[in-house]
Amino acid sequence: MSDLIIVPILLPAIIAAVCLVRVVRLSQLARLLSGASTLVILASALALFLSAKDGNITIYELGDWPAPFGIVLVLDRLSALMVLLTSVLGVVVLAHAVLTGLDRRGMHFHPLFQFQLLGLNGSFLTGDLFNLFVFFEVLLIASYGLMLHGQGQQRLHAGVKYVVVNLVGSTLFLIAVGILYGVTGTLNMADMALRVAEAPMGDQPLIRAGAQLLIAVFALKAALLPLHLWLPQTYASTSPAVAALFAILTKAGVYPIIRVTVLIFGADAGVAAFAPVGWMLPAAMLTILAGYVGVLAARNLRSLAAFGVIGSTGTLLVAVSLFTPKGIAAALYYMPHSVLAGGLVFLVTDLVRRGRGDDEDHLRPGRPFARIGQVSVLFMLAAIALAGLPPLSGFVGKVLILDASAGAALMPWIWAAVLGGTFFAILGLARAGSTLFWKAQGEPAEVPPTRHPFETAPAWFLLALVAGLTIFAGPMTDYAGETTTQLFERTPYIEAVLGEAPRQAEGLR
Amino acid sequence: MEFLVASGIGVLTAAGVYLTLRKRTFPVVLGIAMLSYAINVFLFAMGRLMVDRPPIYGKDVAEYTDPLPQALVLTAIVISFGMSAFVVVLALRAYLESGSDHVDGDPDDAPDHEDVLARQQREDER
Amino acid sequence: MIDFAVSAGFVIIALALVLNLWRLLKGPTRGDRILALDTMMINAIALIVLYGIYESSTFYFEASLLLAMVGFVGTVAYTKFLLRGDIVE
Amino acid sequence: MTQIADFAIAALILAGAGFALVGSWGLVRLPSLMTRLHGPTKATTLGVGGILLASMIYWPVHEGRYTVHELLITIFLFIAAPITANMIGKAHLHRQGNYIDPNPADDIREGLPERDRWATFTRDES
Amino acid sequence: MDLLTISLLPFLGALALAIAGGSLPGGGSRRVHGAVAGAFAATALALVMLHAPAVLGGEVIAERHSWIPAIGLDASFFLDPLGLLFAGLILGIGVLVIAYATFYLSDEEDSGRFFAFLMLFQGAMLGIVLSDNILFMLVFWEMTSLSSFLLIGFWNHKPEGRQGARMALAVTGGGGLALIGGMVLLGNIAGTYDLTAILAQREVVQASPLYPVALVLILLGCFTKSAQFPFHFWLPHAMAAPTPVSAYLHSATMVKAGVFLMARLWPVLAGTDLWFYLVATTGLLTMLVGAAIALFKDDLKGLLAYSTVSHLGLLTMLLGFGTKMAAVVAVFHIVNHATFKAALFMNAGIVDHDAGTRDIRRLGGLIGLMPIAGISGTIAGLSMAGLPPFNGFISKEMMLEEAVHTAWAGVPWLLPALVTLGSLLSAAYSFRYVYGVYFGPRHDDYPKSPHDPGIGLWGPPGVLVALVVLIGLFPTTFAGSLVESVSRAVVQDTELPYYYLSLWHGFTLALLMSVIAVVGGAALLWRHGIAERVWQSLPVPVAKRLFDSGIAKLVAASRAFTEGVHTGSLPRTLFVFFLAALALGIEGMSAGSHAPGMRETIPASPVAIISWAILIAGAVAVVMSETRRFLSLIYISIIGLIVSLAFVFLSAPDLALTQISVEVVTILLLLLALNLLPKAPRSISSLPRRVRDGALASAIGGGVAWLAYAVMTRPANDPISSYHWEMSKPGGGGTNVVNVILVDFRGFDTFGEIIVLGIAAIGIYALLRTAVRGESGQRLLAWIPDQIRSPERHPMMLVVAGRLILPLALVVALYIFLRGHNLPGGGFIAGLVFSIALLIQYMASGFEWAEDRRRTERHALISWGVLIAAATGLGSLVFGKPFLTSAFDYFHLPLIGEIELATAMLFDIGVALTVVGAVMLALAQLSGAAQRAEKLEPSEHPMDIDPSRPKEQGT
Amino acid sequence: MIRNLFPHPGLSGLLAVFWVLLANSVSWGSIIMAGIVAVVVPLFTSPYWREKPRLRFGWAMLEYLLVVLWDIVVANFEVAWIILTKRDRDLRSAWLVIPLDVNQPEAITALAGTISLTPGTVSADVSACGRMLLVHALDVGDRDEAVARIKARYEARLTRIFR
């Protein structure tokens, strides 16, 4: 059981490496291996989820070195949720990519895909700040490869920007980690939490600076305004199926914001306590607006979806940046929704794009295409999910967020942003949908021979998940609530990581 | 010594930041390289400076430099090397695809190729 | 005596480095700059070896060895670039 | 005995450093690239050589261990230095000979007989 | 479970139709679809009606299904008389509309889709009226907006259908958002989202300071949905929908949702001044505006639509009065309006269907051609006009009576007067409908020959007309108990004021007003031409144009904003990022009181100072040589060199080794790339920009320097590395602590790191493999060297030196590798040294030549590297230890002595392999791409000039 | 068998010595390792060095080495003197063309390397036919004499080493 934690990290690494070998690379075997691996990861993620569900915190000490000296993987409710989300989205996107033949349109799709999963899972599971950096880099470099998969001029130029921005971001990450290590002398997050709490007054400003810079890096990945400028073009330039997977990349920025702020810079961190609370909330509100206004402004479906992801992430970040148990709980319910809805919108975008031939996904009237009815239904539902309208889970999430922010100092602004943003989203999505599906006139476009009969299946599956998230909102919110409790009750976490008496290790130092 | 290192880091960072803000890919790549120099030294310095105390274990060695930041820097060097290599090639590839080496893909405002000889003779070597 | 010699050696080589830098920045031709850089590298080797003596430490030997072994590769690449543009062809 | 050795070490260090400085001075002072090429490639070889020799004497005398691996540095330098000089020379010939570099020193344009005899300028088609 | 079943039935119907919808080809399908839809609706209706006796008897049927207990959002239903009324309306009229639509739709239309949407809407509507939880209600509320969007846009080939749908969605959906806000607020005020519980908390709610906000938000939702002024404009445009839809949504159900909600929340919200002025005024205005516009609409459905607006205004106004009596009247009028208005819509549909036009100017005298439709239309129309003996008269009279008793802002006559005016207009347009269609001059140019339709079309309105008459004649019998119990439910009080449903109340002021209204209305119709000219001359803003231009402006503004901000410009993105980081760093540092460090600093030696100066000169030189890229590459080497020296000096030999070797590879890489890139760009940024960037860069540089200094000058805080130091030898089996950390303590980092390197390499490979295709390929083919090139490609001396260096470097690499665990060195450096040695071969003898001698595939090297590292780590699992647990032992071998074997070495082999594979893959591929550009003959010889080589034949 | 094991016997020897120097110790361990290195490394590198130079081991090599070392030391002082004292216009730098007798690339390289290492002269280029060496001299009185000296002092000895 205990070794199960490394499966979501190790298996993709091994499979990816095998997929690189020439014989495998050039055959169907890669598809097979990649698919099997993704399914196994899903299975193990489920198992992990079940084991974490009851509130167990599982520790995996890599190399058998005790924390904080070695690297530990920590499985608690939050990380289990994130890993499960990653795996689910992974399965869906991979299925879509294989069914639509995307994986054949460039090189190394499967290894990159596996590496992407590896990076994501690793960054969700690790309990070590520098190890988090390493996994961030893994997921980033894999995302560069995937983002450029298939290439093309626009994609290459967008790729340059995406890569450079993230490289600069990584630089800042190292600065922040460096400061924190320099001041606290540790890299393990649990240990750092203890040490930050004990830090003398004189050290606290430095810690706070480190915290702010660290959060800034995560905010960059999460596309928090004004650090979101890289996202629209990146997501709009890559192939929509890859962008669907990227729906979780922004959450890879949100996750550590929650983890680090609550765990390390919690209430007892002196002046560093909840360092980002002052600026993140306004920024998140503006993010919502920027995102959904962008939805209205979009000229093609991909950028619409990209802005939708920004808006959705902004909504999520509003809940996060309350940094109250209620807020975090709302965020944790909204998080899976945001991932699945973002993924769904991009998958639908891909279906539209593939159907419409030369018109691609430009928001202009085109010809009808095969399965337009089915795709239009998918689009409608995806749009409902993205905008956060009833009856899908986005609505539930939004209500949770509104509810959580009731009583906050900025409440009117939060509500205005959340609801106003939704209004823009409705306008934009209705425009887009009516242009794409209702204005489609004339002879149907020719059906490309590569269309697979089941190519809409992954999108339907995602939709079913979103629906499931709605129907089972009760258990889900319970889980989110329990997760939040676990997050805010830090002692069990710290004790689990550092052992029953964390100070025993002191003797050695 | 601390001051020298700190100010060195500062200058490298400033140079890196300035270069990454340029509008063509090549200086941006150089800027990233500069930033990674800066960051390597920065991370290293977070273990405090010590002269001639390499972290090679010996029974009678009492003082040593903090080895952990060094290990971190090694990891960081390797990663930033991989990343820089990637971004260099990506920049080149984007240039080949579009004929422009502007980071934003703007069309170039001056032709890149003209009479080679004439150009090189005019070029100021310094 | 050795201490004095080593200290003096440091300063002398450091001066040499400054002279190299001057040529490196001034040029006028690219060949000059490459040459200056190469010289700088060799002076650095001397500096490291000297430091090894100064600290009575063998830990730094590999650094100088490596610099001697791979340092010139850069120089060759620069000159090859001047000659052909492409350093591998 | 140690006295003598120390004297030798000190002398070698100073001589080596001195040669390094002279070589670098030559680099600054000499009038053209081809002449400058003489300074560093030689003076520095002996410069580094002197210091290496000092090191080789220092270890047995002061630390009681024989070390010879300084020789390796010499080996590499002896392989590397001529190549560098050769390549820089070639590059210089090429650029001066093709009027790329505007500096007419070194007499290359005037002084080099039968330009098309040399590998840098011509290819032997035979 | 009943209520859940009831509310699910329409959805199930929709699902069934959606799934089976397309499977029935041909003309008969719509009957099947209609039957399916009708069956589901009728079943639901029957189930509701089963409860009717009990509910009307005062029982409230409640049902609770837990959904999201965390916020008190439960799927709870309750059926009280108000709910029953609306459920009956929804389902009853629903059945009729379905029957009507089955005959109305033509064979070409996608009836499956139509009925699916209709059922979806029905379910949503039903959900609203049955919800016992205000959040749960919101779910259905927005769903009605969405499904009506689909229905209105059903004829999506018509632009007005699409625009109408979008407009409706924008207004009602937007209002719905306000409602969400209002409801959550209300729930927060009341402390529960449970409707029944909220209804009992009038005092608490109205005393809350947030009450006005919540009220305004909720009313926004209601007003938009119920098309109240000034949000009324969407409703007529929704008439682009098929007539059954209009009849259903825009008369009977959806637009009533707002009224329903106001009635539902009446007990908590009503009764305050704010409520009165907001609701009653809006209702009054809407009534007037709607009636006035209706009078001048030539399109039958347009006329009816505005009449609906007007009547909704009436209802709203009644609810706004806040008196119990007014509420009773409202309830009664809801019933009446639903009957006659749905009948009229269907009637208009029949006219349209059978006469081929809905333009009132082209219609007339149809009573003779289609008597059944004519009679029913006339009856419904007169009821709408408020003429006895129809139900419309009764409720309108009661309304007038209420108005008489109500003063607006202390002015007693204002309201009665205006209400009378509204009634007058209402009578006028009703007469116009009846007269214009059925009695006016007969036209001969109908597109179709008008005749009475089959029973399928006239039957459903016929039922409704029958109700109109029956309720009018025997109000107590047919509506009395219903109105009574519903009114009780609305006011949440068993005590109702005295009222009497009857046609005749005696000579009252209300009767006078009624008479004025009817006579005035007739007069107005008589002089319609004049009135119309007056109307046309009024500067009435056209709502649609305003809305359209508003949306267009909004889109334009959004575009301007979005495209102005998100230019995708990298410098801008980075500038913002740097600025943000700077601001955050400063913010962090300025919080609290920073204590300067007390650690003793190391004195700076002259060499250090000089090196520092060189470093800075190098950095400045790199920055200054922006237009001379080759030079900047040379300068950047200075920095690498000085940094390596610093690492040596500051006790980091491993770092120095790594830096030295990485430096070389990086330079090679940059040179390879620079070959194909422009080498001396002409234009650089403008001076102000450079100054700006420079200022920001300096600030950030200063900040980072300051941070570094602040940390360096304070004593270390008991770092965890002391454990590494202690345990390195006994636990990790190596004395080079840095290396032991890398391969053991933090081997997981290293594992990730080689993966990064591997991915980078395969990414580069993938990028360059395609460089020969497409535009890039053409550009490569057209590439001409931008410099004069020396003919010699493979200089002899370089080749010979390379030959010698290669084996020596291999030995050094091996040496560095083997000792890494104990002394500076390790797999990464060894891999780099090895790669550099190989790269010398490429440089000296050329790409082709060196490639020919390559024996291993580089991809495989990367794979094997990762796999070996992983396998090493996995080995420990066999022994029940976690991943990457290392083992080492000392063996005594004869002759050699003691040697140490550690699994960490194996791990290091993986690292080295990956490094070699990655570096070679990246650089070789890059130079391979350049080969394409240069189109050189591959040379079979390692060097160009080799005097010892035998001369080739023939030369 | 032996040939296969040691494709480059000279190189193998050099590598063995090299290893011992690196290890900086003469123990059984290092000697055995040196042996392994001597066998394994050339196996890997031999494809890159197919055309093996024909060498003659012996005193000639040692003699050459010593001569060169001596010349390096002596000439270093000369050049240092020139750098420090001679004015630019007194500098009689010149191009020398040295016709070659040796024709193996390794031999030419060795000669050129020697010329470069001994101060005062730098070999800059080989002729396109490979039979001449272009050498730059910093300060030379009589060009022919300088050429003759190089040929006699170095090339002659090299011809004895390279068969």
Image (tube, helix red, strand yellow):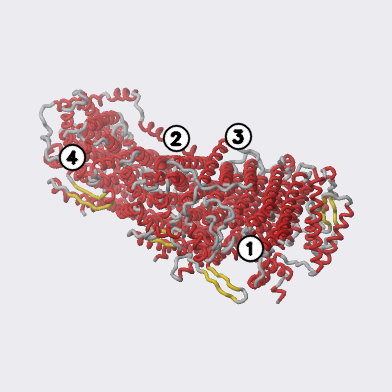
Q: Residue at x 32, y 35 (%)?
A: E236
Q: Earlier in the sequence, mark 4 or mark 2?
A: 4
Q: In the rendered structure, which amino acid carries the disc numbered 2? A: Ala
Give the letter of the chain under mark 2: E
What residue does disc 4 label? E490
Looking at the image, is mark 2 or mark 3 nearer the viewer?
3
List the residue tagged with mark 2.
Answer: E557
Q: Which mark is residue E687?
A: 3
Q: Which residue is mark 1?
A: E813
Is A246 placed left or right of E517 in the picture?
A: right
Residue type of the residue flagged with mark 4: Val
Task: Reply above or below: E944 against A325.
Answer: below
Three-letter amino acid code at disc 1?
A: Ala
First in sequence: mark 2 or mark 1?
A: 2
Q: Quadrant of residue E955?
A: bottom right
In the picture, residue A270 is in which quadrant?
Answer: top left
